[in-house]
Amino acid sequence: MHSHTQQHPLEERSHRMIEGFRNQLLPTASFVIQGESLSRDLLIHRLQQMVAVFEVARVAEASSRAALRARAEVIPQTRLLLEETTGVVKAHVGHEPTKLAAFGLRTEPKSKKKAHRRGRCPEVETLIELVEVKGGHRRTPPRQGRGRKPQERGGRR
């Protein structure tokens, strides 16, 4: 199946099989399929049920593509509307965090350090605060694997 309007190969084959059973065999014919005895009409009915599933899937896929296109078209409009709405909200309620929170907004941190931290988990925040309190700055451990090769340092190979 290459196109969204083209039938699946099994769907095409089922249609041909249905037409063959309708046009070539008598309605009184009976067949044993998968260990079950089926009349011609019951076999045709089962094939039609399976074809219907392919048709439902094709309609659903087309609907999904249309919905995704519609969503893609509305995203820029939604962003613009939310940006303007945010400005209106801040103009009306100010920058008080509790009032902004009612609109799903939060105040921006004053410093770059706080802005950088905002996305971190609480455990990392606690560790950073401990390091800042104890030493003023952090020292990173030396990197392994840099510098001279082991044989140059007198080590073993």
Image: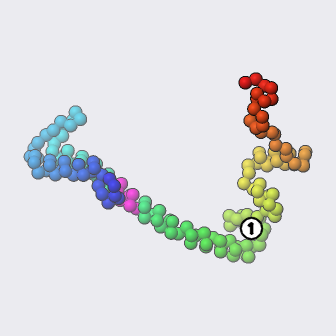
Q: Is residue 60 left or right of residue 105?
A: left
Task: Give how far across and how far down residue 66 sits, in percent.
Answer: 43, 64
User: Is residue 65 toward the left or the right of residue 153 in the image?
Assistant: left
- Which residue is drawn at the image coordinates 15% and 45% (left, top)? 40
Q: Nearer the viewer, residue 20 or 47?
A: 20
| Residue drawn where x is 87% and y is 48% of the image | 137
| Three-letter code, disc 1 | Lys
Q: Is residue 59 magenta?
A: yes
Is 1 a magenta residue? no
Q: Which residues are magenta?
A: 57-63
Which residue is farthest top? Answer: 156
Q: Is residue 4 visible?
A: yes
Q: Badge 1: few (under 14), some or many (20 or more) residues near its Cα, within 10 Å?
A: some
**Relative vertical location of residue 46 with respect to residue 56 in this rendering, above or below:** above
Image coloring type = rainbow
Provide residue 38's location: percent of width, then percent of height.
Answer: 18, 40
Return the residue at label 1.
99
Q: Main secondary structure of the magenta part?
A: helix
Report the residue at 21% width, 52% height from top.
Answer: 15
Indicate the position of residue 54 as horizontal and vertical percent values: 31, 52
